[in-house]
Image (cartoon, rainbow, N blue to C red):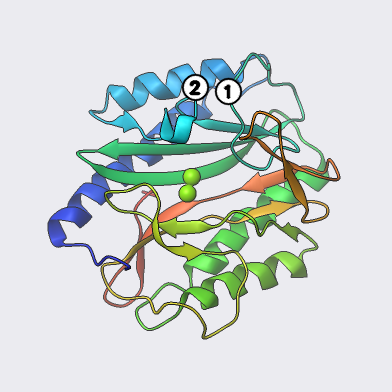
């Protein structure tokens, strides 16, 4: 069952989304060579808690930290640790918060200092692929229209589309129906309706699409060692289109 949110639920999801956005804005000032991913995690956790909300990922199915920090060839679910960022790295930061029982979820990839042209390409076109997907959100369109748009755009720019992890509904659970894959067929899949809330989150690789999961059972890596990027917004289906709840 894909839930249709009430006005009150949408208000709470909107606030949760704003806190996620604000956390990204706060955190990005610290993304520089020399900071550890643990330090970023601590900064984010304090910021989220000081905004009357809870870091949604902490203890989620046993995840040990408040945010995900995925560096270079890590695709998603990187666990903050003592790794110190260095010039030329890219880092994908995934942030989820729970505000009065309602969730917001958004990931963004950032350059650490100066990065290679290849990595710039990856970040630029992965971000654009997210908006290609978001543009398809309106009542009457289908989940497959979103995935088709993202996959086509990614392939047109020679990027590998990770298929094992997908976007999802968002509400009073972090992950709800429907799945929102980053691939699909136009006109297929569940129909979008006003009041649905979904997270769209392309994960694209500079190389091949294949991935593996680390022995820590969380962190996802590209098999070929190529860098990977991840961009995500939580989006409300409105009367005639969409509103990005995690963007201001
Ligand atoms: Mg996320
Ligand atoms: Mg998500």
Question: Residue 225's quadrant in the figure?
Answer: top right
Residue 21 screen position, x and y as percent: 39, 41
Q: Does residue 90 lie above or below 180 as drawn?
A: above
Of the numbered discs 2 and 1, the one sitting upstream in the chain is: 2
Q: Which mark is residue 41?
A: 2
204 relative position to 222: left or right: left
Mark 1: secondary structure: loop
Q: Which mark is residue 149?
A: none
Question: Residue 91's quadrant in the figure?
Answer: top right
Q: Residue at x 35, y 54 (%)?
A: 170
Q: Nearer the viewer, residue 1 or 125?
A: 1
Q: Does residue 175 lie above or below 74 as drawn?
A: below
Residue 162 screen position, x and y as percent: 68, 56
- Which quarter of the rendered picture does the N terminus lie within? bottom left
Q: Residues within 10 Å of mark 1 (few under 14, many from 20)?
A: many
Mark 2: secondary structure: helix
How far apart are the alpha carbons under marks 2 and 1?
6 Å
Residue 198 screen position, x and y as percent: 40, 60
Cβ–Cβ below 8 Å for labels 2 and 1? yes
Q: Residue at x 45, y 37 (%)?
A: 95
Q: Residue at x 57, y 83 (%)?
A: 186
Residue 148 screen position, x and y as percent: 61, 75
Q: Does residue 229 lie above or below 93 as drawn?
A: below
**Disc 1 residue lies near ligand 1 with CB under 8 A:** no
73 relative position to 201: left or right: right
93 relative position to 87: left or right: left
Q: Nearer the viewer, residue 168 or 126?
A: 168
Q: Which mark is residue 80?
A: 1
199 relative position to 71: left or right: left
Question: Residue 96's quadrant in the figure?
Answer: top left
**Disc 2 residue lies near ligand 1 with CB under 8 A:** no
Q: Residue at x 59, y 25 (%)?
A: 31
């Amino acid at each position: 069952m894909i839930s249709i949110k009430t006005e009150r639920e949408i208000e709470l999801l909107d606030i949760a989304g704003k806190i996620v956005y604000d956390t990204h804005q706060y955190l990005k000032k610290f993304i520089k060579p020399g900071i550890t991913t643990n330090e970023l995690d601590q900064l984010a956790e304090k910021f989220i808690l000081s905004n009357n909300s809870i870091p949604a990922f902490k203890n989620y199915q046993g995840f040990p930290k408040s945010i995900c920090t995925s560096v270079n060839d890590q695709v998603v679910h990187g666990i903050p640790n003592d790794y110190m960022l260095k010039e030329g790295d890219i880092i994908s930061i995934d942030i989820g918060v729970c505000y009065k029982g309602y969730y917001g979820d958004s990931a963004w990839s950032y350059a650490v200092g100066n990065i290679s042209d290849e990595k710039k390409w990856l970040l630029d076109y992965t971000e654009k692929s997210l908006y290609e997907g978001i543009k398809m959100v309106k009542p009457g369109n289908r989940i497959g229209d979103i995935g088709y748009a993202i996959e086509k755009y990614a392939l047109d720019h020679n990027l590998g589309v990770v298929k094992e992890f997908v976007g999802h509904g968002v509400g009073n659970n972090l992950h709800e129906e429907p799945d929102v894959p980053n691939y699909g067929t136009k006109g297929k899949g569940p129909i979008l309706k006003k009041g649905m809330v979904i997270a769209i989150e392309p994960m694209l690789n500079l190389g091949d699409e294949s991935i593996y999961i680390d022995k820590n059972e969380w962190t996802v890596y590209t098999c070929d060692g190529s860098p990977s990027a991840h961009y995500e917004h939580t989006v409300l289906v409105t009367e005639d289109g969409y509103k990005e709840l995690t963007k201001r």
